[in-house]
Image (cartoon, grey):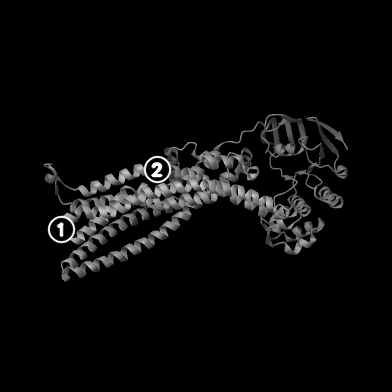
Amino acid sequence: MTESFVNPSDAEVAATDRTPEVRDHRIKPDLGYIWHLIKQYLKRDAKIGWSMVALKLVFTILGSVAMLQFQVKLAAATNALSAKDAAALWPNISMTTGFIVLIFAVSMINVIVNFTLRMRMRTVFTNDFLGRWLVENRFYHLERRGDIDHPEQRIQEDIYIYVENFITLAPTILGTLVTVVLYSGTLWTLSKPVSLESIGLPWTVHGYLPFIAVLTGVAMTIIVHFVGDSLTRTEITRQRLEAQFRNDMAGIRENAEMVAFEKGAAIEGVRLQGIFDLIRKNWRRYTFANAKLGAVLSLPALVLTVAPMALCAPLVLDGRMGVGDLQLVGSAFLMMYMSVSVLATSYREIAIMRSAVARMRLFDEALDTPAHSGIAVSQSTGDVMSTRNLSLRLPGGAPLVEIGDLELKAGDRLLVRGPSGSGKSTLMRALAGLWPYGSGSVQSPEGKRICFLPQRSYMPDGTLASLLAYPNAPDPHADPQYRSVLQSLGLGALCSRLHEHNQWRQILSPGEQQRMAAARALLAKPDFLFLDEASSALDPHSETTLYTLLDEHLPHAALISVAHRPDVARFHRNAMSIEDGRIVLSTL
């Protein structure tokens, strides 16, 4: 039953783990994009960004050196304790305590630097994506093309995931280089020469411990890469499905009254269960991918805690190595292995970061893809809004309506009529520069204020004053004008709530929302006002009041209306009827 309510593309993704982000699953593009993000941040936050990077580098090196010295002094204290040498024991314990304080201080400073850097990086990337998403109506064109799912998640969550994991992983990977340099010398020194004569070979092996640690770490990295490759795919799929689950629940919340009126709770539950079933289906593969990775990582880590002891036990037994030195060998060997295999031991975090990077990269590419349109939109000098050879088509290419040449000038009153689906609203979109399917051109007069009122205007959360001023910020000195226009449109009861912050789209009725939109137009005083069924939710008296106010307050504006009620005609001087894909102009 749930199959009828689940997006087929989501079902396909859940079944195959083949989202658009993983169709090109090579690691090179993702690494290149990570490098691009690093350069972008350091360029836009150069002074503080480079300072933070320098601090991270200094404290990473300082932390590694302090940790090594702590382990060396601890080993010396252990040797002194084994030898019952009090004179050597207490100075080494004092030094160990000092390094504990230093390591703690470095850790605290690192936390502050990390969180500061995370927010600064996130700010740079968020501002960049938000700015490019909102400019030139790209958010609209991306939604229309449908080639990017959930851009809000990519801006809010994916940037957060990338920055959080990068700030954790980058110093860790950098620190491995320091650790390898520091600990390899210690391990080499502690690796006593071992003769192979007992197995018939005339050789003596020197420095075998660091080589074993390096080879083991490299082998583990290669194995984990092949075993854990599926984790990135399942993580990307999980993020997409979780975003859709949230989006569907948000849709119910946004339309709670309509769902309640139509008693749709049960069927909405079926719809949500359908997408959650896909999440569960993906979770099985996600669990298996994590289990494989966990098994490959945990077994060697356990074995390698014992291996140094087994390798060096004979040296301790014959007196060539102290117990403290054995302790140091174990710590240094594990640190060497963890450093060389850092890509393997951090693979889960790398997979999560890479999934976010892949989603960001695809979004970035989509933002840079120009919105192709067959209709040229430009600005012109003068006071006339015009079309030239304008032909509108459906997305599939089928002809819709031939508009040809049309001119709209100050004071015009034009009523657009026609049956449903004839192209009236599409014409409005074309004049607004939002409809790409067709040919010809639209020229808007430069510097003139143009306002479009659709059947359902946008009502963002905020104060009533912010709704009246939208898309501009409210004027703190314009309260008298706001109250006056509310009174004139029959919304006087709202005057006392002018600065109340609320979800007004949930509070105002459809008719009240249309009157609020008309109030915006009256306050904005546009030169061209387009109304697309903008009074359809009003009773005849309220509709007459609305058009009377528009006529009185905007006498020099061009007024173009799409409406079905015959009473609206008396507020217009000319009519455009769309019939069989053609327009017929007449005088009213």
How many tags in the picture? 2
Residue 544 seen from this side: yes
> Of the residues under marks 1 and 2, which one precedes in the sequence?
2
The Cα–Cα distance between marks 1 and 2, rounded to whole angstroms, is 40 Å
Q: Residue 349, image x and y in percent?
A: 42, 50
Residue type for callout 2: Val
Element marked by disc 2: helix
Residue at 79% over, 58% down: 491
Pinpoint residue 427: horizontal percent, then vertical percent. Answer: 74, 36
Mark 1 neighbour class, 10 Å CA radius: few under 14, some 14 to 19, many 20 or more: few
**In which quadrant is the C terminus drawn?**
top right
- Residue nearest the observer in this picture, 576 or 361: 361
Q: Which residue is mark 2?
A: 227
Q: Is residue 553 left or right of residue 477?
A: right
In which image quadrant can residue 587 be found? top right
Residue 536 horizontal/vertical position (percent)? 80, 47
For the N terminus, the image quarter is top right
Is residue 152 at all visible to an observer of this figure? Answer: no
Instruction: Give the quadrant of residue 409.
Output: top right
Position of 31 compared to 148: left or right?
left
| Residue 249 vertical placement versus 237 (above, below) | below
Q: Is residue 432 above or below residue 374?
A: below
Image: 5 above or below 459: above
Q: Residue 375 versus residue 14: which sits nearer the camera?
A: 14
CB atoms of marks 1 and 2 within 8 Å: no
Q: Nearer the viewer, residue 71 or 504?
A: 71
Q: Amino acid at mark 1?
A: Leu
> Label 1: which residue?
317
* Badge number at residue 247: none
